[in-house]
């Protein structure tokens, strides 16, 4: 804890200098620039795994602190050549969970590691072609399918080669990339200590073509095609004896995902806004067989699935507090017949699901119906208050209820689940964000409550109950 406090004080002191016009982290006329970020998030969770007031599950019902420190360096001797490297140190403090990534939802410890390291060739102002090679973030659209997942303490990067054509005069750009996701190292049922850098999963390949245009002046229009070839279910993270294994980044698959996304541009429609995204999938996957999902890619079956998102809102721009009211609907297919030779459960690729389907992370864009209503207010300068209400149904009871990682099943797919009601429940999320007068500091706090529905009650048995669940957090981010 002393280490965290000292880091925070050091950052606050340094940030006071960063507020000055001259950046103290910039050297040689801007050719060498450092960046620093410290993030602390205190979380409180209750019943998030068992939905049982009568059980205090030490692994999950608890209060703990997530700490993340980043240090980056950019070297840009000329406009067309850039080198960037970034290290990251992430810790889970005062947690009773075993610090193995993903087991019981743990984020664990990953001592100072290499998060980004890339070379970028090209100057977008002089030539529309830019090549970026190395460890980097990939973010597309709203990150429903490919994103950095920055809410997570580890976040996500890829070892990738990316070529961008940016036709600014024609109001469009195109990315083509070839990538392997970077996975968190784990060495037995212990924390990730030692001189072991995270490596890419070379058996998990993501290839993409993504184009975006504003030729229609009221909106952004994106077309994309992703191809993913994951040759096994690993990496598999295991904790102490008796703990369930946790899989990262979904099952074995070889699938194509074409899609369309449109989103209105701010200020173009006199307060109105809208967005839509449609994605289809075809190929092969190691989907569920009966009530289980294979733990290895021994049997692949045909894969056909889809997902859809639509939303619209209105902002009263001339009113005090500038209220915005929005309505949205999300749907993603599930496998409605686990005994045939076809998998119809939408595979969510590499998303940032935390932003979309409830902040408690109970759902993914997979086997779900999700209408939602949102109210956002700005009561004072630099402060926003948002209240979101979600309702959740399973697309089909023949498939499971999946958490935000799109892999973990909340309840087993047994006889009770197959015959349960499809209404899972409702969630309300209250979030307050304060962009302080100091540009280097941001605060956010949130509280969420989940009200269980028929599905939770009908599948309650043993240690699994049907009570409500709570989640709260306070987070501060210092960036300069």
Image: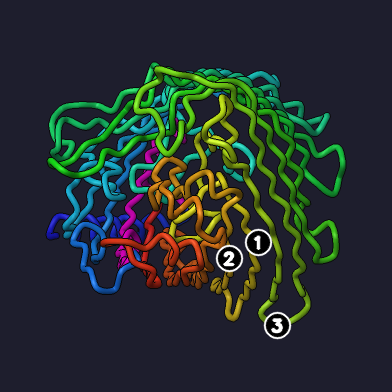
Q: Is residue 68 above or below residue 127?
A: below
Q: Circle 2: is it few (<14), some (14-19), or many (20+) Cα within 10 Å?
A: many
Residue 56 position, x and y percent, is 21, 68
**Residues at marks 1 and 3 touching, judged by CB atoms closer than 8 Å:** no
177 or 407: nearer the viewer: 407
411 or 437: nearer the viewer: 411
Q: Is residue 123 visible?
A: no
Measured Cα–Cα span from mark 2 to mark 3 = 26 Å
Residue 26 position, x and y percent, is 41, 40
Residue at numbered disc 1: 371
Measured Cα–Cα span from mark 1 to mark 2 = 6 Å
Residue at numbered disc 3: 320
Query: Is 45 one of the magenta-colored residues?
Result: yes
Residue 284 position, x and y percent, is 56, 21
**Residue 81: mark:** none
**Residues at marks 2 and 3 touching, judged by CB atoms closer than 8 Å:** no
Measured Cα–Cα span from mark 1 to mark 3 = 28 Å
**Residue 390: mark:** 2
Q: Given this view, does label 2 or label 3 mark the residue nearer the observer?
A: 2
Q: Is residue 92 above or below residue 134?
A: below
Q: Is residue 140 visible?
A: yes
**Residues at marks 1 and 2 touching, judged by CB atoms closer than 8 Å:** yes
Residue 37 position, x and y percent, is 36, 49
Which span is picked out in magenta?
Answer: 22-50
Q: Is residue 188 above or below residue 191?
A: above
């Amino acid at each position: 804890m002393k280490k965290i406090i000292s880091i925070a004080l050091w950052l606050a002191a340094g940030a006071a200098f960063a507020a000055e016009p001259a950046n103290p982290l910039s050297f040689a006329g801007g050719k060498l620039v450092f960046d620093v970020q410290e993030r602390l998030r205190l979380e409180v969770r209750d019943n998030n795994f068992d939905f049982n007031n009568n059980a205090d599950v030490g692994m999950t019902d608890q209060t703990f602190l997530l700490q993340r420190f980043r240090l980056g360096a950019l070297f840009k001797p000329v406009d067309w050549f850039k080198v960037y490297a970034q290290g990251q140190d992430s810790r889970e403090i005062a947690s009773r969970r075993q610090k193995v990534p993903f087991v019981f939802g743990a984020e664990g410890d990953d001592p100072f590691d290499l998060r980004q390291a890339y070379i970028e060739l090209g100057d977008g102002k002089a030539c529309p072609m830019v090549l970026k090679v190395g460890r980097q973030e990939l973010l597309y659209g709203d990150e429903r399918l490919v994103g950095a997942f920055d809410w997570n303490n580890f976040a996500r990067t890829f070892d990738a080669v990316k070529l961008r054509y940016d036709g600014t005069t024609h109001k469009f750009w195109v990315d083509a990339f070839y990538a392997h996701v970077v996975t968190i190292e784990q060495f037995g049922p212990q924390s990730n200590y030692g001189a072991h850098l995270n490596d890419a999963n070379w058996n998990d390949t993501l290839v993409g073509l993504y184009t975006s245009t504003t030729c229609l002046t009221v909106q952004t229009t994106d077309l994309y095609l992703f191809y993913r070839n994951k040759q096994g279910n690993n990496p598999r993270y295991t904790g102490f004896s008796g703990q369930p294994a946790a899989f990262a980044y979904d099952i074995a698959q070889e699938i194509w995902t074409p899609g369309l996304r449109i989103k209105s541009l701010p200020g173009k429609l006199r307060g109105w806004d809208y967005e839509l995204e449609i994605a289809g999938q075809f190929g092969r996957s190691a989907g569920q067989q009966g009530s289980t999902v294979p733990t290895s890619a021994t049997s692949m079956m045909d894969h056909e699935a889809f997902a859809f998102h639509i939303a619209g809102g209105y902002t009263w721009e001339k009113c005090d507090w500038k209220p915005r009211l929005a309505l949205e609907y999300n749907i993603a297919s599930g496998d409605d017949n686990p005994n045939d030779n076809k998998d119809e459960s939408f595979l969510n690729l590499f998303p940032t699901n935390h932003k979309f389907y409830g902040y408690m992370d109970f759902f993914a864009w997979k086997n779900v119906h999700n209408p939602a209503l949102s109210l956002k207010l700005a009561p004072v300068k630099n402060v926003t208050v948002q209240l979101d209400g979600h309702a959740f149904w399973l697309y089909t009871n023949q498939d499971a209820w999946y958490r935000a990682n799109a892999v973990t099943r909340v309840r087993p797919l047994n006889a009770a689940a197959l015959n349960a009601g499809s209404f899972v429940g409702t969630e309300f999320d209250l979030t307050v964000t304060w962009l302080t007068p100091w540009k280097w500091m941001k605060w956010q706090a949130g509280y969420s409550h989940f009200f269980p529905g028929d599905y939770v009650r009908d599948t309650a048995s043993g240690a699994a109950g049907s009570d409500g669940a709570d989640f709260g957090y306070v987070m501060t981010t210092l960036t300069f």
